[in-house]
Every structure is written in C-alpha cells, then in structure tokens.
Image: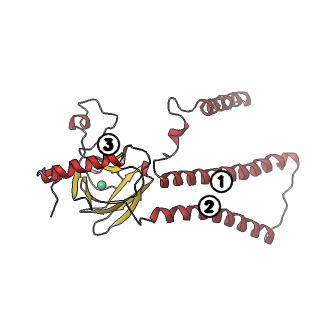
Amino acid sequence: MSTLRLRSRAGVVLAGVIGLLANGPAHAGWGALNMPEGVTPISSEVFDLHMLILWICVIIGIVVFGIMIYSIVQFRKSKGASASHFHESTAVEITWTIIPFLILVGMAIPSTATLITMEDTSDPDLTVKITGYQWKWHYDYMDQEIDFYSNLATPTEEINGRAQKDPNYLRQVDNRLVVPTNRKIRFLLTSEDVIHAWWVPDLGMKKDAIPGFVNEMWAEIEEPGVYRGQCAELCGRGHAYMPVVVEAKPPREYQQWLESRQAARSEGDPQMAKKD
Ligand SMILES: [Cu+2]
C-alpha cells in the first residue's frame, strides 16, 4: 500500500475521532459514558474520587506517552542516535520507586476516608432488613412492624417478545421499597437461599446478601424519586428477574405511606402480614 493511501486512511480515522470528540455519541452526551453521580452523599464522594483518580491516570498517561514518543522521534537511529550502555543506576531505581509510592499514597488517603464513611452505619433514622430469595426481595421495616415481598412486575408477554417492551423492562416491581429523603437509612442484608447482591447504582453502594450472615450498608437519599437496580450476584435461573426499585419520598409523604401500609396490615392484607 502506498504511503499516500496510508496517510489518507489515517486522515479519515483522525477525522472520525475528532468528530466523535466534538459531537459525542448521538443523543447521549458524555455523561452517559461516565458512572452515575447518584443521589446520596456517599455516591457523590465516590463519583468525585472516581474523577480524581481518572485525571491522575490521564496525567500519568500523557507524561509517560509524551516521554516515550519524544524519545522515539528525537533519538531514532536514522538521526544518528546511539544507545548509552549503563545499568544498575541507583538514582533511577530510587526515583521510579518513590514517585509511584507517593502517587499511591496520594490516592489512598481520600479513598480510605470515603471507605470509612461508607462503613459507618451508626445512628440510623430507620433500619430496613433486606432478604434475598430466588428470585425476589423481602423488605422488613424493623421498627415499623411492616414487611413485604417485592416481585418482578414485568408482564410475561414482554419477556416472551409478544408485547412491546417497557422502557423499564425487567426493572419494575409490584411493591417498591419506599423510604424517606434526607434520613439515614441502614440496610441489613441477608439471604434465605443463595448469595444475592442488592444494588442500586444511584445510592452509590452494593453489598452481597449472604445466607446466615448479615451485611450492613446505608444511604441518605437527597432527591425524591424512583431509583432502580438489580441483583448483582449470579443467583440462578431467575437472576435477571429480581430487580430493586427504591422510591424516595419527602418525610411527610413517607409517613402517610407508612400509615396506610400499617393500616392495611391490621386489616389483614396477606401481602402485609407480619411473618412469625
Ligand atoms: Cu439474586
């Protein structure tokens, strides 16, 4: 292939990359390529951490590839460069040990602070025990005397391809986990059969639900809204059919919901019946 043709091909590829950088993927925007920023203090912290580490990696990439490309071009054989023949340079060894060490320590300090905050489930305003089952979730509001199962609500026709799929296909449930906004919610996670994992990306945390074991996590949701997730640990045939839907309501609306649920329970709604 001639040099000219190679050059024109490289030109087409370059134009494509520049076009993508200028316009972004159609209708999506760059935000869609990044991780979600979420709606809790923890998720914002995790997002900021992710961006910090990303930019550190970008700078390292530019410096390393910059030096490499400069050296390849500047000291090429055709320009008459001759290689130096040294080895075992103590100064070089110390430099390339110390610099990465400092970079890693610099990354570890904010990461550790975030991890410590994540693990601090003390002083919650409410506690919800979440139990994983093949293939549904059970929510127990521990101090409120209510509990219920949350099952997939996507119609079978959509799953079998006999009906148009909803935008929230496989991410709809019959009973949502309703929680108040701006309150510290502690989640206790366990399972009655195999290992599941309760995951809502907007809450910034994911933990395994393990039989015979209780894991803890927490969230304080700042924005009212509906947040969707799913089981994130392959748990058998119905793994794709146990979504998580969290609905955050302002505290007053949450209180109304709670009272209506408690009333339904005392009227003997089997869905609301407290297990013994
Ligand atoms: Cu599961």
- Count neighbours of disc 1 (C-alpha within 10 A) and say few if under 14, some if 14 to 19, many if 20 or more: some
Ligand 1 is within 8 Å of the C-beta of the residue at disc 2: no
- Count neighbours of disc 3 (C-alpha within 10 A) and say few if under 14, some if 14 to 19, many if 20 or more: many
Which of marks 1 and 3 precedes in the sequence? Answer: 1
Q: Residue furthest left?
A: 268
Ligand 1 is within 8 Å of the C-beta of the residue at disc 1: no
Q: Which mark is residue 19?
A: none
Q: Can residue 89 be seen in this view?
A: no
Q: Is residue 205 above or below residue 93?
A: above
Mark 2 and mark 3: Cα distance apart in space: 35 Å
Quarter of the image with the C terminus in it: bottom left
Do residues under tags 1 and 2 come within 8 Å of each other at their CB atoms? yes
Which of marks 3 and 2 precedes in the sequence? Answer: 2
Say which residue label 2 marks: 107
- Where residue 47 appears, x then y in whole percent? 53, 51
> Please, what secondary structure does the residue beneath circle 2 have?
helix
Which of marks 2 and 1 precedes in the sequence? Answer: 1
Q: Can residue 24 be seen in this view?
A: yes
Say which residue label 1 marks: 56
Say which residue label 3 marks: 171
Depth order, front residue of 274/255: 255
The structure residue drawn at horizontal position 88% and vertical position 49%, both measured from the top left corner, is 80
Residue 113 is left or right of residue 14, and the answer is left
- Where residue 246 appears, x then y in whole percent? 34, 48
Do residues under tags 3 and 1 come within 8 Å of each other at their CB atoms? no
Amino acid type assigned to the residue bearing label 1 in the image: Ile
Q: Is residue 169 above or below residue 51?
A: above
> Please, what secondary structure does the residue beneath circle 3 have?
loop
